[in-house]
Image: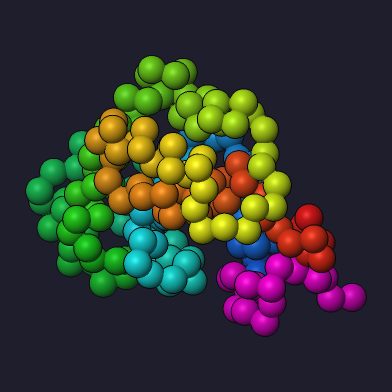
Amino acid sequence: MNKKRCGWVEGKEDIYIKYHDDEWGIPKYDDDILFEMLILESFQAGLSWITILKKRESFREAFDNFNLDKIIDYDDAKVSELMENEKIIRNKGKIEATIANAKIFKDIQKEHGSFSDYIWNFTDGKVIKAEYKTKSELSEKISKDLKKKGMKYVGPTTIYSYLESIGIIDNHTKDCFMF
């Protein structure tokens, strides 16, 4: 029996369906996963999510499995190496932002105990169901706070997608088996 899914994933590639079924809209609290998704969403800005999903394993390899402590220490030589890597998105601004954002992510962890505590505090730990938007007051508020802290590539639309990816916003449609 075929499962009914959200319209945006119907008829798409298996990698998209797997992402929808196993990750999208499911609450995540692990800082390593929260960091990976933040970086992937920032690289997605201006591109399609399927592009990022197809390159995800290459991103993991290139960025030391999104090891926060390693990324914080990336230098110009590592940036040059990443710019030469044809398997990832070679955008110098996004690569440099990843390094800077990693440092800010670490600062947020120190200040709040974990990034998870920080991000989930915006909704008092609650999941927001079915808004079906591309940005919201919540994503604008979080975007503004992250930008104030110095993060880049974290605009309200990127943050809205991020909140969907980490399950703070659950936008599965009512006819989807995940609803």
Closer to us: 133 or 103: 133
Closer to us: 90 or 58: 90
| Residue 35 point in image, percent of width and height | 43, 41
Up-down relation of residue 16 to residue 67 (above or below): below
Image quarter of the N terminus: bottom right
Q: Is residue 115 shown left or right of residue 125?
A: left
| Residue 127 point in image, percent of width and height | 67, 39
Residue with the most extreme left position: 76
Q: Is residue 118 shown left or right of residue 100?
A: right
Task: Residue at 10%, 51% (x, y): give it.
Answer: 77
Task: Residue at 28%, 32% (x, y): give it.
Answer: 148
Residue 125: quadrant of the picture = top right
Any magenta on residue 161? no
Q: Is residue 70 shown left or right of residue 121?
A: left
Up-down relation of residue 5 to residue 142 (above or below): below
Closer to us: 16 or 123: 123
Residue with the most extreme right position: 1
Color scheme of the displayed model: rainbow
Range of residues picked out in magenta: 1-16
| Residue 124 point in image, percent of width and height | 62, 26
Q: Can residue 162 be seen in this view?
A: no
Residue with the most extreme front position: 137
Task: Residue at 18%, 67% (x, y): give it.
Answer: 84
Residue with the most extreme bottom position: 11
Image quarter of the C terminus: bottom right
Any magenta on residue 12? yes
| Residue 42 point in image, percent of width and height | 36, 54
Would you say the magenta stretch is mainly helix, strand or loop? Answer: loop
Q: Can residue 18 be seen in this view?
A: yes
Up-down relation of residue 104 to residue 76 (above or below): above
Task: Residue at 31%, 56% (x, y): give it.
Answer: 62
